[in-house]
Amino acid sequence: MSRRKKLILTVSVLFIGINSLLVYFDDKDRVSRLTYVRDWAETVEKDMYETIETTAVLATAEEKNVYFAQEKGSFQEFLVKEGADVETGDPLFTYRVDSYFEIMADLESKQQKLNGEIQAIESAIASISAYRIPQTDTDTEFDNEAGTLEMTRKSVDANYMKEQYLAEKEKELAQKEAELKSVQAQISELETNGETITVESPYQGKVRAISDSLDNPVVTIWGKQLQAEGELTETERMAVEQKMPVKVDIRENEAVLTGTLDAISDSPENINIRGSSQYAFEAGLKDESDQPAENDQSAQSESAPQAEESEGQTDPAPEEETEENGHQEGARETDGAVSIKEAADSNQTSESPESGGGATPPDTESVEQAKEEKSRMDHLLPGYHADVTIITDESKKATVVKRKQLFNSHLWKMTSEGLLIKQQVETGIHMDDLVEMTEGTAPGEWVAEADNSQFRDGAVFITPLKLDDIEWQDLSKYDNVNWKRYMIIGLLSR
């Protein structure tokens, strides 16, 4: 090797070595660096949930009893059979009275009592309907003779509690009116014939049992309202509370119901030191038509199962491999950005009508699907098995990122100035491959998807040219892009 070549080689090695040392010992970032970002995606909004998955079986939520007091008269006959469907006002049985005046006085007393209860419920409904919820966080207590309603937290929660209260009172009012109608029918019949009374059903449902021996209750009616019953493990029991939302997927016909946990046992069915404990739960279910309106909240059922008694009544992204100086106007989303958008939108449907004004009418297919769904709901029976999802925590419209974008407790954020920033964040709910960001970032920001060793806080970043994202068949869509502006910005940034 000639002397000249040795000199050139020595100078080259020294040049490379000195520059490498300068970069290595550059603690104050005097040497400008470029960071290559291969994949990136946009932070998005999504409703996040923490859930518990378990199983359950459908059962009747309400068992209602009708009684016959034998001291009031002589039983004549049943007018229904076991398994029969009954509506409010359908005749159940007849009996002959022993004392006309005593029975009439008793019926009139019950009629007066029911009228008073109905007036109290109507007054409560009118009062709470007229009450306006303040549009700020508040603690409110509404009290009257029909009950007490405590409304707390944010105004949106208070409005939802108000709707639930009204729904419960309207249901109670309908039941009292049915009982009153039954009593009035008995009074009318007794006034007409003077000795026979037909007891009508104050309930709607299916006749579960008839007592031929006249042991009370003489008629037991299963309500049509269903509930899901199941068991929780010890770990699951510690994580759940009453009124948590649930989703119930019926296995056989794919029907989906919503509701809330109405009852959770505090004692296991069997206590065994060597076995695991199981805690029973009941989830009240509601059809869509029964659920009160609410603002951006999951529908929740507030009705608890009970036994009632009655006595015959009652991307824009960079597209050139150059220094990033801001996201281009009209630029398209890249593969990385599309993937997280699809993940975030997978469980959400668009609610905005098409441009041109007004919501579009449902097509034939949508109508048929709605009919099919209603048919599945109508044919649900006690005993059907279901998969239950209990929502233990939720965050509406949360800012989310993919797990692979989160590195310990920070993100690599790509700013519109073309800089890569190491952003500290705080996390919330983890769901599938998404993570909620409670602090440190907002929807619509771009973050890198790999924590490469070349990443530097505050460094200028470059991205690959993605030719697949260019719509070569429709280049005219890029006519509105200010190419001169971006070329000048690129040259100046050098």
Image (cartoon, grey):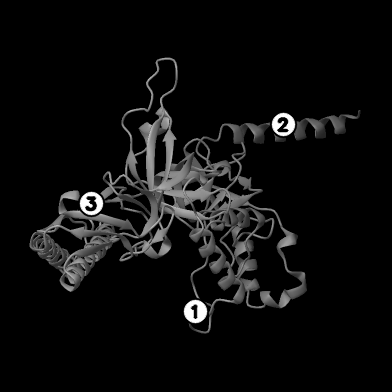
Amino acid at circle 3: Phe
Query: In the structure shown, which secondary structural element does the residue marked by tag 2 occupy?
Result: helix
- The 10 Å Cα crowd at callout 2, few under 14, some 14 to 19, many 20 or more, is few
Q: Position of residue 153 (x, y in %)?
A: 23, 53
> Distance between the Cα atoms at labels 1 and 3?
55 Å
Left or right, 128 with reference to 450: left
Which quarter of the figure has residue 488? bottom right
* Label 2 or label 3, whichever comes before in sequence order: 2
Disc 2: which residue:
14
Q: Quadrant of residue 23?
A: top right
| Residues packed near mark 1 inside 10 Å, few (<14), some (14 to 19) or many (20 plus) | few
Q: On the rendered image, what quadrant is the C terminus found in?
A: bottom right
Q: Earlier in the sequence, mark 1 or mark 3?
A: 3
Neighbours of disc 3 within 10 Å: few (<14), some (14-19), many (20+): many
Give the label on residue 68, or none: 3
Please give left or right for residue 205 compared with residue 312 in the image.
right
Query: Which one is closest to the eye, mark 1 or mark 2?
Result: 1
Nearest to the observer: residue 421 or residue 204: 204
Label 1 secondary element: loop
Q: Nearer the viewer, mark 1 or mark 3?
A: 3
**Residue indicated by mark 1:** 359
Quarter residue 318 falls in: bottom right
* Residue 56 location (% of width, % of height): 47, 41
Tags 2 and 3 touching, CB below 8 Å: no
Q: CA distance from mark 1 to mark 2?
A: 72 Å
